[in-house]
Image: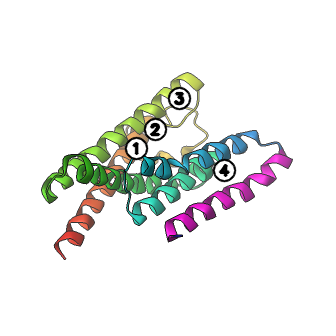
């Protein structure tokens, strides 16, 4: 068994262990996040069934981002407790989405290095946009506050005291900037790896 498989199983065990206390405390939101997180841990396996090969780095990064974003971020409210958590997750998402885009470009269009770089960065930015649209849709439909647009948001850590814009715009733009930074950092790393 390869390291990514051990890592994935470790994440699954960790999610179950951290969800057990939620049963006794009747924190059903955490149980829902645990179930969703566990379900999504199988995505790389499903992609493998479709002959989509992800690198070991991409598999480990995917499980890490999934655990950080869905389980710790939403379930245990790390987004509200830690100022930097959301930005770190979006940076890592930029890297992860780049890796997915590079794998797609190599498999489907068999592009040269420059083509893979352009496609993967564009793919990462497109997925970041989809994430922001989904956040907005959930906020509108479920009356949540993922984009920090409410004037009386309990999560004030996304709003710098000197900001001239409302919290929602600042949150969305910071997530976009960090997602772009992650995609560009991944592109630079990919290029350096290939020219070695």
Select label 1 or label 2 by which is in front: 2
Is residue 84 visible from the viewing direction of this image? no
Q: Residues within 10 Å of mark 1 (few under 14, many from 20)?
A: few
x then y, percent, for residue 186:
30, 61
Is there a contact, CB below 8 Å, between mark 1 and mark 2? Answer: yes
Q: CA distance from mark 1 to mark 3?
A: 22 Å
Select label 3 or label 2 by which is in front: 3
- Sequence order check, earlier mark of 1 and 3: 3
In which quadrant of the rendered view does residue 143 lie?
top right
Q: CA distance from mark 4 to mark 2?
A: 22 Å
Q: Which residue is mark 4?
A: 76
x then y, percent, for residue 32:
68, 40
x then y, percent, for residue 157:
53, 49
Is there a contact, CB below 8 Å, between mark 1 and mark 3? Answer: no
Q: CA distance from mark 3 to mark 2?
A: 14 Å
The majority secondary structure of the magenta stretch comes to: helix
Q: In the image, is residue 23 part of the stretch drawn in magenta?
A: yes
Q: Which residue is mark 3?
A: 139
Q: Which residue is mark 2?
A: 167
């Amino acid at each position: 068994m390869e390291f990514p498989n051990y890592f994935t199983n470790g994440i699954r065990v960790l999610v179950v262990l951290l969800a057990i206390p939620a049963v006794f405390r009747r924190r059903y939101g955490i149980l829902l996040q645990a179930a969703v997180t566990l379900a999504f841990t199988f995505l790389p396996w499903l992609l493998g069934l479709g002959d989509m090969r992800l690198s070991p780095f991409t598999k480990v990064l995917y499980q890490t981002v999934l655990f950080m974003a869905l389980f710790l971020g939403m379930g245990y409210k790390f987004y509200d407790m830690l100022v930097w958590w959301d930005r770190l997750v979006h940076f890592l998402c930029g890297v992860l989405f780049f890796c997915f885009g590079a794998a797609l470009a190599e498999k489907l269009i068999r592009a040269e290095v420059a083509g893979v770089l352009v496609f993967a960065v564009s793919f990462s930015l497109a997925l970041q946009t989809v994430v922001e649209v989904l956040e907005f849709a959930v906020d509108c439909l479920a009356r949540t506050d993922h984009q920090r647009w409410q004037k009386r948001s309990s999560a004030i850590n996304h709003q710098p005291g000197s900001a001239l814009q409302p919290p929602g715009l600042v949150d969305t733009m910071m997530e976009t900037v960090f997602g772009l930074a992650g995609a560009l950092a991944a592109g630079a790393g990919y290029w350096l790896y290939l020219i070695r």
